[in-house]
Amino acid sequence: MTITEARELLDSKKITAVELAQQYVERAHQRNGELNAYLEIFDDVHEQAARADEMIARGDAQSLTGIPLVIKDNILIHGRVASAASKILENYVASYDAHVIERLKEAGAVFIGRANMDEFAMGSSTENSAFGVTKNPIDPTRIPGGSSGGSAAAVAGDLAIAGLGTDTGGSIRQPASVCGLVGFKPTYGAVSRRGAIAMGSSLDQIGPLAKTVEDARLLFETIKGHDAKDATSLSGDALEGARKVQRIGIPRHFLSEGVDADVLAAFEENIKKMEAQGYEIVDVELPNIAYALAAYYIVMPAEVSTNLARYDGLRYGVQKQGNSLLEDYTHTRGYGFGKESRRRILLGAFVLSSGYADAYYRKATAVREHIREDFRKVFETVDVIATPTSPTPAFKIGEKASDPLAMYAADIFTVPVNLTGVPAISIPMGTVNRDGADLPLGMQFIAPHKQDATLFALGQEFETIRG
Amino acid sequence: MIDVDIKKLAALSRIEVSDDELTELSNEIPSILAFVEQVAEVSDMDTKYTGEHFNVLREDDHTHESGMYTKELLASVPHTTDDGYIKVRKIITQD
């Protein structure tokens, strides 16, 4: 069921919000033991849905009123645990609603529960959660992607109609791609980050995961907008109207290596379908894009090491005491952080440290500006850029867990988007059969800054053309 | 590969790392650095920040009534005093 379909059922009184939510809660309880998509299924779903029914009865229903949603565990809901799937915050109760949660509550949406994720949003498989991996509903021996793997698995497994994730290097788009969903990363600043547990503050955005482009658009429209309490939030009128797409640019020089043959074949097939419908397909050069992954894995750990410095056990979260204040810190953080978090904090400390900051962090920041300029130039000649979202379909649980660099390579097409702040969408583009399961593949479209609406318009066209 | 003092990084980051993990990280971190240091190949001449946001500040005035959130915030604190303070170890001694 999509948001659009549920809205029709609710507004025509064929079902109540309470009945709808109950269906999702029951399914969530049935399947969560196997999938581990939810860290917690909320105990007040009935009350939330009842309030939605009141709104509907009053004639005040909005697009998301009564719609059951899953919320990633790094987005604060007042009075609820938000742990970012980390032991260090496993008992932390949020003291305020994230801006996006305020907006969703005003809209009468229903939160089914909080979703599993890679700890502090660091990972591409949800294997870095302190509370166990989430399984891909399409093939439970495989990962659901990451870091928003729990949200993706919940929506793909029909344990929620849609949901929220966060995307710092691809963490909405890549799970969407490997779970057969639509995932959208807004223009940086389009959605307030207030109440999202910060990972990489110049890279993070909250965004929707849904079954259709229209559903994703409805969710985005509800959560986007200026927030005076987020200094990086764009003004309310900053986003532009949808532009007609005529030319699609493909950085073919960047797709030649390290991409699964079936992914490339599906990508080319879909591009041909677009061409047959009148879109002009153009080869484009992004000269510095090969350096994007390296620049990302310097800038992001640097920001992570700073953002995670606050977890010291003194003001919130778990504390493990030692024999001194210093030991209180080192024991708390040694115990509370998982392996990948520790790895990235140390990496970040290194690239920022005296004697190395110039060669690593400052250089990476310069590379970032070059890549931003490359995109700006390319967008003078094409309307959007297309790539596969992920270089591979869902891999097996454990397959890349022991090789950090192999895992990082999963982000190769998604990180340039976060580095530059442009919006991007991942839309299902077909499947490939592996070991008896039809594994989804995703097409990524990238637009210039503030042309989020263009991606939704093009996305809906693509859904029709793809068939 | 670059020589990295993992112990020093762990100390800087205030993280206790076991000897086994120190060994693992002594291999992993240099190999990640060997990958990322390719950014050195790109010239950084003439780059300047061209993003939307630069020094976005608010007026330096009252954002909310003092004490409004104290009780709720203290509820999360592991150790508090009876009169509403965060309790920490003594760090200043007098001879």
Image: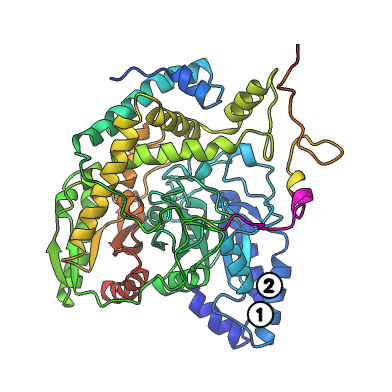
Say which chain tag 2 marks.
A
Chain of the residue on which disc 1 is drawn: A
The residue under label 1 is: A16
Q: Name the kind of residue labelled 2 in the image.
A: Ala
Q: Is B48 drawn above or below residue A151 in the view shown?
A: above
Element type at marker 1?
loop
> Is A119 included in the stretch rendered in magenta?
no
Residue lying furthest right = B82
**Protein image colouring:** rainbow
Q: Quadrant of the C terminus of chain A?
A: bottom left
Q: Residues within 10 Å of mark 2 (few under 14, many from 20)?
A: many
Q: Residue at x 63, y 29 (%)?
A: A332
For disc 1, the neighbor class at 10 Å (few under 14, some 14 to 19, many from 20) is many
Which circle's residue, 2 or 1, is located before the other in the chain?
A: 1
Residue A150: mark: none
Camera-side residue of A242 and A90: A242
Q: Residue at x 71, y 55 (%)?
A: A79
Q: Which residues are magenta?
A: B59-72
- CB within 8 Å, label 2 to label 1: yes
Residue where numbered disc 2 is placed: A49
Q: Is residue A299 visible?
A: yes
Count the marks: 2
**Of the pair B95 and A420, the residue shown nearer to us:** B95
| Position in image of residue A224 (x %, y %) | 49, 68
